[in-house]
Image (cartoon, helix red, strand yellow):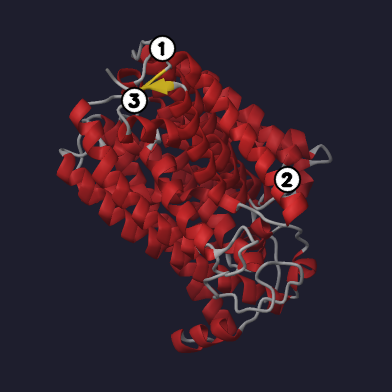
Amino acid sequence: MVAHEFPFVWFVVAFAAYTALLFWISHLTNTRASSKAPWPVVAYGMIGASISGVTFISVPGNVWVQNFFYMPLVLGFVVGYIIIAKVLLPLYYRMGLTSIYTYLGERMGKTSEKTGSVVFFISRLLGAAVRVFVVIVVLFSFIPKSLTGENSLLAFAIVSAVFLVLLYLYTYRGAVKTLIWTDVLQTTFMLLAVVLTIFYICRDMGWNLGTMFSALGSSLNGNAGTVGYGRPFTAWFDWNWSNGTNAVKQFVSGIFVTVAMTGLDQSMMQKNLACKDLKSAQKNMYTTSIIIVLANLFFLFMGALLCVYTQRLGGFEALGITKTDEIFPAIASRYFGVGLGIFFLIGLISASYPSAGAALTSLTTSVCVDFLGDNDDRRRKVVQAWLTLLFLVLLLALQVLSSDAVINLVYKLASYTYGPLLGLFFFGILTKRRVRDRATPLVAAAAPAICLAINLLGRKYLGFDLGFSLLVVNGLLTFAGLWAFSKKEA
């Protein structure tokens, strides 16, 4: 357990070599890229797109304060994937959609379609910016302070700009099938990095598989003031109803988070629509749900190991960190050898490119199809360039303002921004009422504002936090608002 500084030259070599490999594979697959791919390949590749750098960094670190209270949310994902497979995918395939928000236009009207597209644009833009942000923060931490100088914000901006330029080039020519095959490569490296991390920590602590599970089960969370305090790091369920991590709230939220962030997300659905038929797309959903549960459990076990390892090193003060998101990067850059440190970096990049690239591609598609009505290559490249610049602005804002664990920030933002989409789609699917099209933007704006007021007042006067179940409340308010501005179909 001797600390050291990770050699900067190896950081540059690992980052450049892996990025070059991705570009090469992208070039090879693009020459034969089509719109269809085998469903097992799509399912496996979706792990990388679903997990992202946030899961790679923030989920393990969050065990320090919340134990395994994230798992009920993940179990809710499975039910959400079943709903997508049984309800949404048949609808999308039957209508032959390019942009899934076209459904809102045909069901409710053009204003509703534009509203859904705007909500998606804001949701995906903020979510993707947060996911990219955590990756760049980690990459930035590997750069020696002697190179970043006193103006760290300027250095952060330069690192961000380099990463975003590479991301732009990565998605510049890639068809959907190209992204699917590069996702497969990146999912493999990401999971390999987790396996090697677990192996290294167990070896350093002198544990075999049996003693590892025994040590984790007996290692208590000693961080006073956290929801997981006094319980084993591997405790799954929080039954305190007033906490945002309450198991029931988490499970219900997981269902609707998946429906909203996967089933109503253009980037995730365009990969499912790349399957050869509906049956294959449904198989992809079921397979993905199982793999996502196992992968997240894998990350949480790694997180528990990192927390025990951090305790042995002396805690946050000994590592010189202040946030849970810094635990994994700090240990990787100072205590892992060069070989494992390189795998950590490659795993991080592997977790970041799929989700960020998919977000940039889907945002471009949404803007071109739903707003501009023109999806030709020239227009796409211009839109993609402007979106990349907007990402840079958001990353700098997050660097100045962010304080919470990024995984929590992702779902908090989703609770406010995806709620209107949830209400819009389910109003269209579950009712036959004709909504007043021009009222849709008002309803979509009012629901998140009311949710914000409810949660702020609830925490202040009742000590009650809705947590991620805020998404459900948001969707219900949108549904109720649409009902109020609708009439029976003639």
Q: At which x and y percent is residue 430? A: 32, 36
Q: Nearer the viewer, residue 222 or 428?
A: 428
Residue 380 visible to the viewer: no
* Label 1 or label 3, whichever comes before in sequence order: 1
Q: Secondary structure at mark 2?
A: helix
Instruction: Indicate the quadrant containing the N terminus: top left, top right, bottom left or bottom right.
Output: bottom right
Q: Nearer the viewer, residue 72 or 379?
A: 72
User: Is residue 84 shown left or right of residue 204?
Assistant: left
Residue that numbered label 2 is attached to: 457
Residue that numbered label 3 is attached to: 433
Residue furthest to the right: 150
- Viewer-side label of 1, 3: 3
Residue located 50% across and 89% down the image: 211
Residue located 59% across and 40% down the image: 413
Residue located 34% across and 25% down the image: 433
Residue that numbered label 1 is attached to: 379
The alpha-carbon separation of the residues under discs 1 and 3 comes to 37 Å
Q: At which x and y percent is residue 188? A: 36, 56
